[in-house]
Image (cartoon, grey):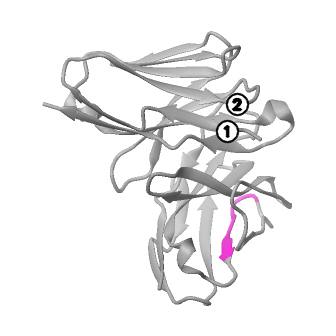
Amino acid sequence: NAGVTQTPKFQVLKTGQSMTLQCAQDMNHEYMSWYRQDPGMGLRLIHYSVGAGITDQGEVPNGYNVSRSTTEDFPLRLLSAAPSQTSVYFCASSYSHRGRQPQHFGDGTRLSIL
Amino acid sequence: ELKVEQNPLFLSMQEGKNYTIYCNYSTTSDRLYWYRQDPGKSLESLFVLLSNGAVKQEGRLMASLDTKARLSTLHITAAVHDLSATYFCAVDDGMNRDDKIIFGKGTRLHILP
């Protein structure tokens, strides 16, 4: 059972480039979310989804897009990368957005924008 | 808008001592989570607290929730070096018809041998 899989694990981009961070889960979880982690800032919610076809903004959505066409996948797109988006990105999933289970986290994607 | 505050943000303590980490949040919630993160690693779940007065214990860690005070505590008993990590609380904003789960900034715990 793979859990939450994030790819790539590391990426270096130039300012202005675009890319997609992939996230897939094989637990049939309804709820998926993306966070970014910066030193001293904890985890900040970027976008989240309560099910296929439904997405919503979190605390820091600007510069990012998401889609949820299937239950399993929740990709995060950086439209035009900026140095301020240098961070560690975590994808997480849980069975239900009002359930009794915690979120399961992927291993993270370490992204540097030059 | 839900805000989650943890304190202290950094804690250095001796092995064998007891200490408490506090997690305050700003709006009504009945779901609170504690996670642990080791350096360079992902987050792992420690506790899920689902009602007022809930108490969960695992080894030297005990978490509790007071929804009226909007406060959760993570108590460490007789700390050992292996508990050195960053601890996060996270709060579900679902009672306010919002499905966000918001994290505190984390408490970095360093236990000295």
* Span highlighted in magenta in the image: A71-77
Question: Which quadrant holds the C terminus of chain B?
Answer: top left
Crowdedness of circle 1 by 10 Å Cα count: few (<14), some, many (20+)?
A: few
Q: Is residue B59 visible in the rendered structure shown here?
A: no
**Above or below, comparing residue B3 to residue A1 in the picture:** above
Say the numbered circle drawn on residue B26: 2
What is the chain identity of the residue bearing mark 2? B
Secondary structure that dominates the magenta span: loop
Amino acid type of disc 1? Lys
Position in image of residue A27 (x %, y %):
63, 49
Q: Are dots 2 and 1 in contact, CB under 8 Å?
A: yes
Crowdedness of circle 2 by 10 Å Cα count: few (<14), some, many (20+)?
A: some
- Res. A103 image quadrant: top right
Task: Identify residue for label 1.
Answer: B3
Can residue A78 be found in the magenta stretch?
no
In the picture provided, is A1 more to the left or to the right than B85?
right
Position in image of residue B69 (x %, y %):
66, 15
What is the chain identity of the residue bearing mark 1? B
Position in image of residue B28 (x %, y %):
76, 25
In the picture provided, is B28 more to the left or to the right than B8?
right
Can residue A72 be found in the magenta stretch?
yes
- Res. A58 image quadrant: bottom right
- Res. A47 image quadrant: bottom right
